[in-house]
Image (spheres, rainbow, N blue to C red):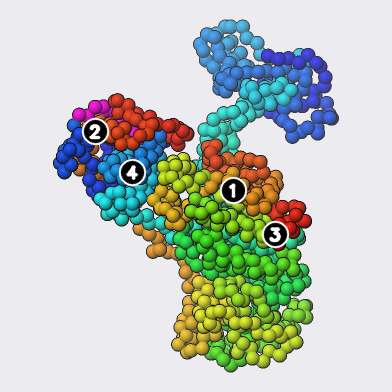
Amino acid sequence: MPRYDYESRPFPTLWSNLLTPPPPFHAMTSKNHIRPWLGFSTSKALGNFGDANYMEQLLVHCATAIETNDATLVQQILWVLNNIAAPDGDSNQRLTCGFLRALVTRAARSGTCKVLMTTAANLAIATHKFSIIELAGFVDLTPWHRFGFTAANAAILDAVEGFPVVHIVDLSLNHCMQIPTLIDSIANRLEGPPLVRLTVAGLTEDVPPMLDLSYEELGTKLVNFAKSRNVTMEFRVIPSSSSDGFSTFIEQIKIQNLLHSMNREALVINSHMMLHYIPEETLLSSPNASYRTIFLEAVRSLDPTIMVLVDEDADFTSRNLVLRLRAAFNYLWIPYDTVDTFLPRGSEQRKWYEADLCWRIENVVAAEGAQRVERLEPKGRWVQRMWSAGFRRVGFNEEGVGEVRSMLDKHAAGWGLKREEEDLVLTWKGHNVVFATVWTEKQDEAWLGTAYI
Amino acid sequence: MVEFENSSSMAVSAEGSVSSSGELLTIPPVTAEKKKRNLPGMPDPDAEVIAMSPKSLLATNRFVCEICNKGFQRDQNLQLHRRGHNLPWKLRQRAGNEVRKRVYVCPELTCVHHDPKRALGDLTGIKKHFCRKHGEKKWKCERCAKKYAVLSDWKAHLKTCGTREYRCDCGTLFSRRDSFITHRAFCDALAQESSRAQTLAVADSEGTLTVQTVASSSSSPPQPPLTPSTGVLSPVLSIQSSEAPENLPAQLVHQQPVAASSTTPAATITTGSSSTTGGNGLNSGGDSGVFASIFASSAPPGFSQPSQSPSSFSDMLCAMASPDPYSSEPMLLSLSSSLYLSTNPSSLFPNTNHDHHHPCPPQPALSATALLQKAAQMGATGSGSFLRGLGLELPSSSNNLVKSENISIEAGLGLGLPTAGPSHLLGPSSLYGNEPTTLDLLGLGMGGGGASTAGFSALLTSIGGGLDVATATAFRVNSNGDSWEGPSERKPSLL
């Protein structure tokens, strides 16, 4: 791993003169008097502090200090972090820098450090608004998204075999990026292409990746593309919010479903890294059913032919800042680590990529309540939720697994595929990254009849 | 060395030449083993099995002269060399039946080819196998980042790398089909191509459009409002396509911008059936005349399906105006529905008195003008020149008309499609700006090297001290301030 050359170059820091260095402890009696450091005990290279272990410890202690309102300590640790976590350093440094930035924002917001207000304001993250072509290239930089796309498409294709009409309900973070390949493969199916009705949840919240194109325009392009593949497609977008568990969206789907229930129509619920935006139990004060539970039960009541659930395998739901920070740190190193394999330092795309990551880190660390939307849950918990909602898990067929494998072969060597029970898990250097699960209604129809009236 | 005593007929011969003696033993016809062809390494049980260490296997000059330490790749060459030292030497005889075939096992214990029963028949083969499966991949392709352990594999790859690329009409290259497809779907090149294809009656697009019509009229479920969608477009476009090459003067094609001409049939319908709009503003008289006549011809040649006469086209338009579950929704978009939206103001079709006429649906929530504006916007940015055409016909005020005419010219040239230019890109954030470091604020002089880093240690020490006081965690700093101890888990740096 490349280490920063600390000796010969000025160390790049997140901010420069915005934050005064904190007084040393032995000088703390005279707070306004800042004097240079004395007593250099060792000459140990700073590089050792670049270790992720130390960085995580520093971040954790900074978070603790913020929570305990210890302004001086916060300031000191931030200052140290600022000098060891270069925004253009190695992947650990950049990762830490993202957290540092988030902690500054949190400290400023919570009022722990008034001094940090201006710093925080200057550190506002500029997320990129992608053009559709940029985004199309962007999602394929790593298998992060394509893994789910490929697995889901294979499963969907399998499930809708023989149906003359396929209604795809797309709840996807990536603005329909999965749809072109789905159309392409559905166009080539043996019995001829079905009529495809695509209903998209247009997320009203602004979460990256942001697109500079309206969903209407996006729809025109998709319809046009489908036509070029001899697929008749109808596109429809329902602006909806994750904050209420897509309740309006579900209502609309329900109405449509009723209208088309006479047809032999397959209903496909495709959720790609979107459901973790729905508030879960930790956001509730009362022990009511969370929006997440309500949403899944509502989806279940639609009797979908198939539901695909793809999401990131991590837990960002803790109410405890330190636990959350650690969970995020121990998951989000992966996108920073992978970026070195495909994007050169200083490239424009890399800045977009990392700005989006910084946005997520800040949301996990600095935001609270309904503002905190990055609420990932690990696969196991989702599986529990799906079971409770009355879904039955189905596996991926060998063809689908093969497609995912051959897709991964074309990416960097660190990516891997793991089969856990019936599910597929994308791994990076052995660590779980994204999981893909496929669900259908429970087979026992008679039982269902009594359960869902 | 392992040897098989069992003597039976030689069944498998490796393709390479191992024993440089080059004698060819007569190979009896392969019988039972033939079925197992895909399993590499089913050697002759009679062959001599040779096991080599990885080192000797990969050694380039493994036959070494004991006098001068010169190494040779082949024993025969060493023997020849030994003659120079006046040492006893022996060249292998060609004819000898006594020379046994040799097979080689892989030195990797866990490998299937470690088993003598699955030994490989030639030395080069086992070398390559060992490198490929158990060796380091030293050779990297600069283009696609694939790595190879065997030089010849790498060279072979270089010859083909990049030949299986996907190229979009916009010039972008893709090595993977899925990324190409995704790009293709959203690239403006597709929109341009499809409009061009329709106008110039490229056989391909004609074929596909017709097929589509058939499909929508026969195989789809009994749901009139849904099925026509793009199918409705097909008759129009197909008519035009089949007629255009013969009937349209080339000059007309030139006069009429590409995209605009494909919208003309619709425009003609509009002007023909109602007098509400200034549709003529788009088409100079002669052109619309030609198109009108095409459209008026009752049974266009090349069209066998009775349902696709012009009048049935109106039928279909009307059919589309039948209650559609989608119509009550505000955000509605598909080719068909846009068409529906634009034609929905019933004043456009005041005299539709066909059998299949459906009552007008409940009006959408948005006003017609708003819908039209939406349609026009879609037309201006999207690819659907057809949409654009309809959108342009409808604004009632003359101001709008002038405005939309401008759009139509732009769009018609096929150049007005917006592309995301670099102007949209955000500048580098302040985060990445190169600014002086904070370190000088300390007066430490970071450039000084060791001294300043020691400063950090001091700082950390002091913080550590502070932490011990301030926070009651299991985290502490060693007395020399070198290392931090805390709960250790997996760390990225360890990977």
Tell me the SS state at disc 2: helix
Labels 4 and 2 within one chain: no
Q: Is residue B203 left or right of residue A432?
A: right
Labels 3 and 1 within one chain: yes
* Residue with the mark numbered 4: A68
Up the image or down, B478 lies above or below B345; here it is above
Up the image or down, A214 lies above or below B235; here it is above
In the image, residue B87 lies in the stretch drawn in magenta: no
* Residue with the mark numbered 2: B455
Image point 52% across, 74% down: which residue?
B378
Tell me the SS state at disc 1: helix
Q: Which residue type carries mark 3?
A: Tyr
Q: Which residue type carries mark 1?
A: Trp
Query: From mark 3 to mark 2, how far is it between C-alphas?
Result: 68 Å
Labels 4 and 1 within one chain: yes
- Expressed as whole percent of the image width and height from the top left, the position of residue A268 reads 66, 59
Q: Nearer the viewer, residue A150 or B81?
A: A150
* Residue with the mark numbered 3: A452
CB-based contact (under 8 Å), mark 2 and mark 1: no
Chain of the residue where label 1 is placed in the rendered structure: A
Image point 52% across, 35% down: which residue?
B139
- Expressed as whole percent of the image width and height from the top left, the position of residue A47 reads 33, 33
Query: From mark 2 to mark 1, how far is it between C-alphas?
Result: 48 Å
Image point 56% across, 63% down: which residue?
A247
Tell me the SS state at disc 4: loop
Please state the extent of the stretch shown in magenta in the rendering.
Answer: A39-51
- Expressed as whole percent of the image width and height from the top left, the position of residue A296 reads 61, 56
Going from N to C along the chain, the mark reached first, 3 or 4, is 4
Locate the N terminus of chain A and report the quarter of the image it occupies: top left
CB-based contact (under 8 Å), mark 4 and mark 1: no
Image point 54% across, 85% down: which residue?
B394
Q: Which residue type carries mark 4?
A: Thr
